[in-house]
Amino acid sequence: MALLEIDELKTQFFTSAGTVLAVDGISYTVEEGETVAVVGESGCGKSVSALSILRLVADPPGRIVGGRIGFMGRNLLELSDREIREVRGRHIGIIFQEPMTSLNPVLSIGTQLTETVVHHLGYSEQKAASRALELMEMVGISDPPRRLEQYPHHLSGGMRQRVMIAMALACEPKLIIADEPTTALDVTIQAQILELMKNLTRELGVAMIIITHNLGVVARYADRVNVMYAGKIIETGTAEDVYHRPRHPYTLALLNSVPRVDQQRSAKLDPVEGQPPDLTRLDGSCSFRPRCRFAQEECAQAFPELAYVGDGHRAACFRSQEIAAGLEQVA
Amino acid sequence: MATLSEGRLAVAMFEEPAALKPWHVKLRDMARKQPVGVAGAIIVVLMVLMAIFADIVTPYDPLLNSYEYMLAPPDGNYIFGTDMLGRDVYSRIVYGARTALFVGFASAAVGGILGLILGVSSAYFGGLFDLIFQRVMDVFMAFPLVIMALAVVSILGTGTENVILAIIVPFVPRCARVVRSSALQIREIPYIDAAKACGFGHARIILRHMAPNVMAPFLIMITAFVGQAILTEASLSYLGLGVQEPTPAWGLMLQGGAEEFAESAPWVAVFPGLAITLAVFGFNLFGDALRDVLDPRLRSSQ
């Protein structure tokens, strides 16, 4: 049995402008120790899908309206408030996007690091303090005793993100959700943080869901990839499959829009034209159709099923076979 | 340091981390930047010392009548004179500081803390809870402070404890309102989401993660509250609804002296009146300076 099984998850926002179908029936699994990436452009529902796992979507206006999230033999959507709080931080850790504002400015680093282990595992102050030192060393922060006394404003962005990682790992969770963990950091720090996360999750056998819009991150750090578009997963497979054998026009377009070192500098980028659809007005046809260069009659009739296009590789497109054939020709 | 010019000195002091300065240097900087606030602080500190050491600094028992010296004008024996019962006005003012500060601090502290918890909770939970709570607060705020306190005292009866309670009641909504508006901003900052994601309960998030972040406006308000509480207590006592005889209280002393002896023995009313004025003045100055120091938006650009 997989560690995390998300089945037909639906999260909607009830706003004055209408109901936003932010997450519209997505299903995927995360195995123990596996790193799964969820990629997509802004507003495609990737963050909401991650927050929904821990039921952290603000209600109102958001609500999880359907589906099942199986984790350690339980459906997280059916737990009481008290029970879900015991899962948060204890069994599933989360790393947020903004290291500058994700730490409380009035509490010392040590206090924030020890708080979860004291709260969830009932550690004594002393035991928690030594755990905090251990965690600080684990995430590569120098001079831990001094850093523990300090406050968030004494630390740089990269260091704060390391503290966030340490906090997420404090209770030895089974799963970590990283919501765009490197977006707010500069490029060199991004690589360091990602390497650190990769090494730590591997050493500790922690599974990770990494939410990102950076395809480079996906290729390098993820075992499997879910590509989301307009609240749905439109392609899923191993990083290798999705990166080298995309079967959905959106994935293909995304990959083509990334600047590449092996191309001439004068080569023009190939952007994905148009805007993502308004999530309050989805009509049951393929939501990528207006921007798709492969669109045909059939695409306006129904949303294609997520169908197998290879071993463990699925795509939601009527023409995925043709795309496969086309790509092979080019190659 | 002495050889440096004034401007260089200022720069050097600015660059030096605040934590490294000895306390007396910090105090001197403070006095230079906030002379008015320091004056207020001195008044407050003197008052507190006066109240604590009332036994030592007074020459007479504040309750002791001496019928030979009724309405004696200020002189060497009675520096502020005596009242119509022959009690030493100075001693009564000093002991009155005890009453005033006790009422002031107790009501500001209890009212403030209740307001803090309610205000932060209101902001944290939001939605219907917030809406209903704020409307209830509106009802309380519709009454001026003294009127509200009067109403409470007329229900509960007089006496020091009831006066404190009467001042707490109108303080809570005022504090809750200000705290809530700060807490609304705090709630939107990701570290509150992070705390939720750590699996902490509502009480822990409210008290440990949100409340410390609204301390600046809270402390400023508490200081102002103490001054207001002293004034309200004096008003209630003056109206005969507050602290009762023979407990020494400034408002009570005014009541006993103002009308009858305004011309024949003005010292009976003038000195307690001055005490009230000075106390409220001191707390307000201190509160204003505290706001300037704690509120970054009001910090001068120098």
Image (cartoon, rainbow, N blue to C red):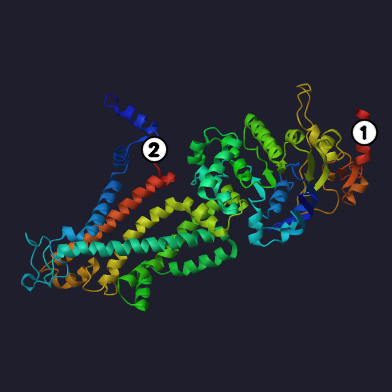
The type of residue carrying mark 1 is Gly
> Residue at the spot x=32%, y=51% of the render?
B286
Can see residue A104?
no
Residue A210 falls left or right of residue A251: left
**Residue A145 appearing in the image:** yes
**Secondary structure type for disc 1:** helix
Badge 2, how many Cα within 10 Å: few under 14, some, many 20+?
A: few
Q: Residue at x 55, y 58 (%)?
A: B124
Q: Amino acid at mark 2?
A: Ala
Q: Are marks 1 and 2 in contact (CB under 8 Å)?
A: no
Q: Nearer the viewer, residue B76 or A37?
A: A37
Frontmost of labels 1 and 2 is 2
Residue that label 1 marks: A326
Q: Nearer the viewer, residue A316 or A221?
A: A221
Residue A21 appears at what percent x and percent y?
75, 54
In the figure, is residue A109 to the left or right of A300? left
- The chain under label 1 reads A
Q: Please tell me if label 1 and label 2 are on a single chain.
A: no
Residue B19 is marked as 2
**Where residue A324 sits: x, y (%)?**
91, 36
Residue B77 percent across, percent down from the top left: 7, 61
Q: Is residue B12 above or below residue B99?
A: above
- Residue drawn at 76 percent across, 22 percent down: A266
Q: Quadrant of residue A56?
A: bottom right
